Amino acid sequence: MNRIQDTDKIWSKEAEAATLGSMIIDPKCIGQILPVIDAKSFFLEEHQTIFGALISLYLDNVAIDAIILRTKLKQLNELDKVGGVEYIGKLMDSVASSANAIYYAEVVRDRKHFRDINRAIEKIRKVPDEPIEVSEMVEKIQSLALGMEQTQPQEYLTFEDDAERIENEQDGGASYIPTGIRNIDNIISGFGRGELIIVAGRPESGKSALSLQIAMNISRRGLAIVFFTLEMPGRSLIQRALRQESASSLKKLDIILYGNADTPSKQAAFIKLRKQTHKVDVIVVDYLQLMNAGGKSENRVQEITSISRQLKLAAVAEDIPIIALSQLNREVTNRENHRPRLSDLRESGAIEQDADIVMLLHREDVYRRVENPGAEQDGRVEVIIAKSRRGRKGRTGIAELVFIDEQVKFENLLHGADYYG
């Protein structure tokens, strides 16, 4: 492979020209270049323009050559600005073939990352001079540092090559991580990569207990869990787990409890650090309303909206499920049967919008206990799958469970999966 001899870390004119030249003489390589760079990866504005025109033609399924590119740039009133027909010819002459197109694109990408790093460093240097609290400075620096990390190549799929494969995976449940609770898995099959799963309920409904039990079940399959415990100390969660299993059994579970991450940026930083030495397969956040966005927000609804959006983006970026617990508003308690609805998600409709799956917990005996402490408690729990964003396979329904108070554990109610979606 021919290596580009360029000592300038800011940008490489040769790499940019070679990338564009490869795309013009062999448009088939564009599909491989697309996941690596975008128009902003180029340093020269004229190169950004030419790249954008090539991508536009490619996405429109237009056969690409120098003449068609010239026509496209002329339609955009950009041909003279990029150097005219002569410059397009120079780009084509800069490479003999497209054999090294990906390498050239990676050089362009790396130079862009170096420019991003320099800009971030300059911004970080100015943070101590800002009239803000030290804690806000730390948050801002963390955010800037995370923002200059390299992004992972995007996954490009086609209906022709991938639709049947993905359908077969879903039919066999291969894409999903089972919760280990049969009546729930009978409805949703489990959690998928990149999904944001909301587990919502009123206080004492069992949100933390259910999420802990699911985390333990998943970890038994050899998967690694990061559990951000904001409501309850990690020690208390371990004490709960010990009511179900012995310490020797729990030692085999790959679960880390972390309580010092109440913002999306802190959680992201911890995940990045954890992944340097360990794998991370599933994240649990207990719970969403105890988080803050890490910056100034006009109101709490706007802040929750930002947190919800960042959790969904994190799930996609890390390509793993994120299970986020959430409170339901008080309107549930005023309802005759107390059964929750999607509209009861507290403080923001964005939670429902961002979530791929919403599970609402309903325990009628909790309300009976308040109204009549001497009333019989049957432990029955409804896990209402109120939303499942999986197309025709996205079933909703009610999984009926029983809560065993002594063990702080949920069990399946016999024949307790009643589909209605």
Image: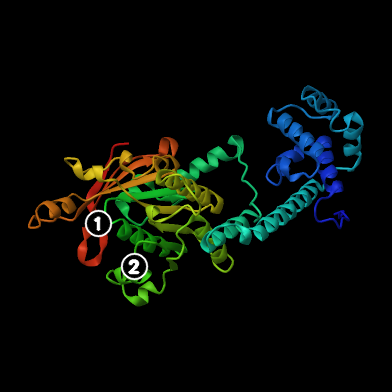
Q: Nearer the viewer, residue 253 or 312?
A: 312
Q: Residue at x 52, y 51 (%)?
A: 314
* 364 lies left or right of 182: left
Q: CA gap, disc 1 to disc 2?
A: 15 Å
Left or right: 185 as drawn, with respect to 3 = left
Q: Is residue 72 visible?
A: yes
Residue 152 pos. (x, y %): 63, 52
Q: Is residue 196 left or right of residue 13?
A: left
Q: Amino acid at mark 1?
A: Glu
Q: Residue 407 falls in which quadrant of the image?
A: bottom left
- Image quarter for residue 212? bottom left
Please determine whether, in this image, residue 93 is positioned above or below residue 402: above
| Residue type, numbered disc 2 | Leu
Residue that badge 1 annotates: 204
Disc 2: which residue = 237
Quarter of the image where the N terminus is located: bottom right
**Sequence-first tag of 1 and 2:** 1
Q: Position of residue 19 (x, y in %)?
A: 81, 43
Q: Which residue: 44% across, 36% down?
A: 391
- Answer left or right for 6 relative to 331: right
Residue 23: give its label.
none
Asked whether the residues under the numbered discs 1 and 2 touch, taking CB atoms below 8 Å apart as contact, a structural biologist would say no
Indicate the quadrant where residue 43 lies.
top right
Q: Name the residue at 80% across, 49% down.
A: 104
199, 162: nearer the viewer: 199
Task: Residue 193: tell me if it is visible.
Answer: no
Foreground pick, 391 / 126 = 126
* Farthest-out residue, front: 131
Q: Secondary structure at mark 1?
A: loop
Q: Residues within 10 Å of mark 1 (few under 14, many from 20)?
A: few
